[in-house]
Amino acid sequence: MSTPDIATGSAVEEPDPGPLTDGQLTSLSTRAARNLATTTKSEPQMQAITSRWLLKTLPWVDVKGGTYRVNRRLQLRTGRGRVHFEQNGADDIRVIPETLTELPILRGYPDLDVLREMATRFQPREVRPGQVLFEAGQPVTEAYLVVHGRFTRFAAGKYGGEEIVGVVTDGDQMGDEAVGQSDPLWLTSVRAETAGVVLALPWGVVQEFTERVPSLAAHLQAYVEQQRKPMNRKGEAEVPVQAGHVGEQTLPGGFVDYELAPREYELSLTQTVLRVHTRVADLYNNPMDQTQQQLRLTVEEIRERQEWELVNNREFGLLHNIDYGQRISSFTGPPTPDDMDELLSMRRKTKVFLAHPKAIAAFFRQCNRRGLVPGSANIDGHEIPAWRGVPIYPCSKIPISADHTSSIIALRTGEADQGVIGLYQTGIPEEFQPGLNVRFMGIDTAAIINYLVTAYYSLAILVPDAAGILENVQLGRTAD
């Protein structure tokens, strides 16, 4: 602040008095007033709480006996598994013999010594991008196991050009279609889209093992005979029916056979012991009950872990239990609309897409490149992004691998639609929420109150095509 000097008429700066001290204040300071005021407080916050859309969208089935059995029609077509490898340097790559039983032709073969010997006959071979392993119509001279890389199956289109049939990635195999054929030919061509490594087994070695090992020959013959039995398009034992007939023809008869060893899902659990000191529980409860707040955050943590288990648990989680026949890889790396359409076409009545938020962002980038605008779905007042009318729910429990790739899961849900269901049991003792109870465990000699908090749950895929997965989707940005 400045004042005019009377003698000279110029302005003179006055010294700044600075902040007033408590002794100079003319009224009560806010700092002192806070000692008499009531503080408005929030409930304890927790950053790790997510939307948990998987728990919300799954239909939950009450399992009173603690075990859920999935009865299915007899399956004749053997599912495709994936083999695993061990590597000691660039040139020493071997298939783990026990995982050879994941191949359809060796499913259930018991002689481990034969599998070990067969594993030693595979030879590693590096492939370069663009290299064609074999072409359609050529004789099958080798069987292949893919150690690493992405390969495209393609064939000549009906109207010229190239028609992409599928993608082969890590752990897949090529060559089982030659079993039981006197003069086997490749049905499609295969080209390497990236640099990779395969293990090759000459077809003559397979024939040598068949001639030398009677048990292997019998196993392969049984496999061929089973594949020749009448079956529907899903590989289930066919029921003989007749249609379009006239007159008094004799109708075929039969029955629907069941699997003799159906899978059973036992409820899993997540548990913790919540400890609260009696002094805290007795004295510090206004305006918020300390025990209730401790319990609320503990339950939130248990529910977060529950969703993680439904996605990642090796026994029942989605990532490890989706049938390998329902797994596809992205054609180009990033998740494109074409990939999502392919995933959607693999089942009827897809209800849910689940993807890591970064995978959703990667998909939107591909839509932006093509000038497409994904739709949305209103779910309980929330606007959720959707593709072809199917909502895409964010799920941070789907992992991102070290090479910055992830997966997108598609589900058909509900018992009525033979889909994916959640399992829990209600009415358990001292139930706090459905399928979750809080049991008082007593007070120890240190005056600590102990509560056992437990959630019981599991997940079941009723038929293989109820769930599918788009694997190896690239999340990073690509240069224009």
Image (cartoon, rainbow, N blue to C red):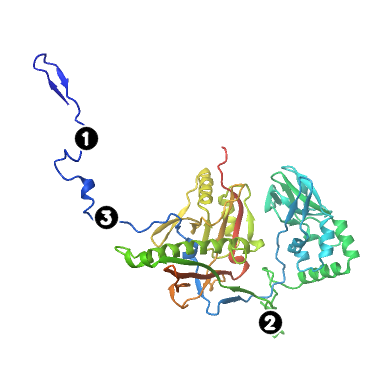
Q: CA distance from mark 2 to mark 3?
A: 74 Å
Residue 437 lies, in percent from the top left, at 46, 73
**Which residue is tagged 1?**
19
Task: Name the mark on residue 39.
Answer: 3
Task: Name the mark on residue 255.
Answer: 2
Look at the numbered disc 3 and give the secondary structure of its residue. Answer: loop
Picture layout, residue 122 above or below residue 101: above
- Most foreground residue, 418 or 435: 435
Q: Quadrant of residue 210?
A: bottom right
Residue 88 lies, in percent from the top left, at 76, 49
- Among numbered discs 2 and 1, the one appearing first in the sequence: 1
Picture layout, residue 302 above or below residue 127: below
Q: Residue at x 67, y 79 (%)?
A: 256
Residue 317 is left or right of residue 120, and the answer is: left
Residue 306 lies, in percent from the top left, at 51, 64
Residue 440 lies, in percent from the top left, at 44, 74
Q: CA distance from mark 2 to mark 1?
A: 95 Å
Task: Name the mark on residue 142.
Answer: none
Is residue 222 at least partly visible in the picture? yes
Q: What residue type is disc 2 on?
A: Phe
Q: Residue at x 48, y 51 (%)?
A: 374
- Among numbered discs 2 and 3, the one appearing first in the sequence: 3
